[in-house]
Image (cartoon, rainbow, N blue to C red):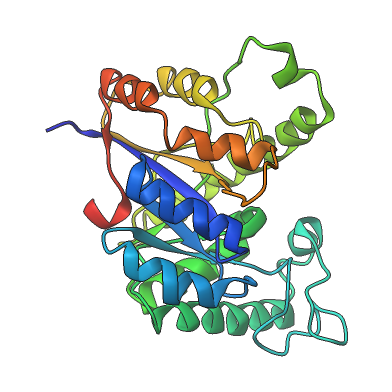
């Protein structure tokens, strides 16, 4: 039995039927064992009524959301007059110590978690656009994880590495990712300290921020190669879609990751056991 664990996780479960379809197919015929469900996704009903019943061993996460879609509660500091979220990451960061804002965030987070718990017990908490990594919001997330008996909360400590391919690095997307990478790593160190005073667990490393929307077999393999050779949980974030059309984008390419048997062999060759949070 190895003490190095690899978790391939699909975010955006419930966002659309294309994401849902990819998760079902990747679970049944691929490497996928974990998905983060968004309670306010347009395809939430499809996710919980048609996909989850077919994925009995899937590890399910709560993908908290404060930036996209229709809120479940009245949180006017985060939405327009119609209750649609209209703020972004940096608004949340700048205002994260505002007591009224935190009160509204807690109420909304509770509603999202409780909506998901009606259908399945979550194994971990994550978030859309990494919003829960902001320390004041992370403290709130830990509080709710303990209250709702959710054993894991995702953190975003990613070791910098280089993929020797011009198309991966000479583009605006990559430089935008480097900014997210810097914020995520800075906050991860603070958040891991906060975790020490709780019984909530987390992953040790993450892959999928520096090369977000560019993930493939190569980015995963090179990222895993620089993970320290010691007991750890490494989570890889992807956003796979399986369209009915011939549409080809980063989401379809990330779906192919789940079908890659050669990658599966390489993961095992690096000493990792492929698992999920439910099995840990």
Residue 154 can be seen in this image = no
- Above or below, 73 against 249 in this view is below
Q: Is residue 135 left or right of residue 2?
A: right
Q: Position of residue 178 (x, y in %)?
A: 72, 31
Q: Residue at x 38, y 68 (%)?
A: 52
- Name of the residue lying farthest toward the top: 164
Q: Residue at x 74, y 17 (%)?
A: 167
Q: Is residue 268 left or right of residue 173?
A: left
- Above or below, 124 against 42 in this view is above
Q: Is residue 15 left or right of residue 227?
A: right
Nearer to us in this view, 68 or 154: 68
Quadrant for residue 90, please give it. bottom right
Q: Position of residue 73 (x, y in %)?
A: 67, 88
Nearer to us in this view, 169 or 13: 13
- Above or below, 110 against 43 in this view is below
- Name of the residue lying farthest toward the bottom: 74
Residue 15 can be seen in this image = yes
Nearer to us in this view, 17 or 264: 17
Q: Position of residue 146 (x, y in %)?
A: 37, 72
- Name of the residue lying farthest toward the left: 1
- Name of the residue lying farthest toward the front: 245
The N terminus lies in quadrant:
top left
């Amino acid at each position: 039995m190895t003490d190095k664990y690899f978790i391939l996780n699909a975010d955006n479960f419930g966002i659309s039927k294309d994401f849902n379809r990819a998760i079902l197919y990747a679970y049944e015929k691929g490497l996928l064992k974990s998905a983060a469900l968004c309670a306010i996704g347009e395809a939430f009903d499809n996710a919980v009524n048609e996909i989850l019943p077919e994925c009995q061993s899937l590890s399910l996460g709560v993908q908290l959301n404060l930036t996209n879609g229709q809120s479940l509660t009245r949180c006017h500091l985060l939405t327009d007059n119609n209750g649609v979220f209209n703020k972004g990451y940096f608004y949340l960061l700048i205002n994260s110590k505002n007591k009224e804002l935190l009160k509204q965030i807690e109420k909304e987070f509770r509603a999202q978690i409780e909506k998901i718990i009606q259908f399945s017990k979550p194994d971990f908490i994550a978030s859309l656009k990494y919003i829960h990594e902001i320390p004041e919001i992370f403290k709130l997330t830990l509080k709710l994880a303990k209250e709702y008996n959710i054993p894991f909360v995702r953190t975003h400590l990613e070791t910098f590495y280089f993929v020797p391919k011009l198309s991966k690095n000479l583009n605006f997307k990559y430089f935008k990712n480097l900014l997210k990478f810097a914020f995520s790593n800075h906050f991860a160190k603070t958040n891991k300290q906060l975790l020490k005073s709780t019984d909530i667990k987390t992953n040790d490393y993450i892959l999928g921020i520096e090369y977000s929307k560019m993930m493939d077999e190569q980015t995963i393999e090179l990222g895993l190669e620089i993970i320290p050779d010691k007991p750890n949980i490494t989570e890889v974030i992807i956003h796979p879609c399986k369209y009915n059309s011939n549409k080809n984008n980063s989401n379809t390419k990330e779906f192919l990751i789940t079908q890659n048997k050669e990658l599966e062999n390489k993961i095992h060759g690096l000493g990792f056991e492929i698992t999920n949070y439910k099995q840990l």
